[in-house]
Image (cartoon, helix red, strand yellow):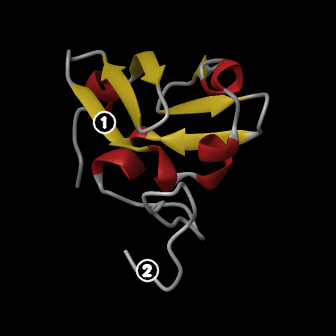
Amino acid sequence: MIEHLDNMRPVDLLCDDDLLHVKLTDGRIVSVPVWWYPPLQEAMPVERNNVEFMPSSIHWPDIDLDVTVVSMLLGRQASGARPLDASGKMRMGTRQ
């Protein structure tokens, strides 16, 4: 069981083309691949960085996406998540 949820509140975020970086109240920075969340991967940079911090999650209002801190820490990818190949296309048949 994950304890001390108050220390895992998201307080800051940076999202680029490759990684989502979330800073937590305890100072940790959690980074996960953007491809874990297909709506985020397909979003424009301004949409990726327009966020609302919730007590235990992040909400992207422009793309109606919610990601919990716990899911990031546990490595849970969204349904349909697939890494991109070198040409920027989704790899087919890749299981994560």
Q: State the image coordinates of residue 48 (x, y, percent, origin top left).
A: 62, 27
Residue 30, position as x, y percentages in the image:
28, 33
Label 2's element?
loop
Q: Which residue is mark 2?
A: 94
Q: Which residue does the image show at 60% across and 19% down from the upper left?
A: 49
The answer to the question of whether label 2 and label 1 lie on touching residues, with beta carbons closer than 8 A, is: no
Q: Earlier in the sequence, mark 2 or mark 1?
A: 1
Which residue occupies the foreground of this view, 57 or 17? 17
Q: Quadrant of the N terminus?
A: bottom left
Does 81 sit left or right of 71 as displayed?
Answer: right
Please tell me how many numbered marks the rendered image carries. 2
* Label ID, residue 31: 1
Residue at 77 percent of width and 39 percent of height:
64
Residue 4 drawn at (x, y percent): 23, 32
Question: On the picture, is 78 further left or further right than 83?
Answer: right
Question: Which kind of residue does numbered mark 2 sit on?
Answer: Thr
5 displayed left or right of 20? left
Q: Identify the element where label 1 is drawn.
A: strand
Q: Residues within 10 Å of mark 1 (few under 14, many from 20)?
A: some
Task: Give the amino acid at mark 1.
Answer: Ser
* Dot 2 crowding, Cα within 10 Å, few <14, some 14–19, many 20+: few
Residue ID at (41%, 22%): 10
Image: 44 above or below 93 = above
In this rendered view, identify the residue nearer to me: 33 or 57. Answer: 33
Vertical position of residue 90 compared to residue 50: above or below: below
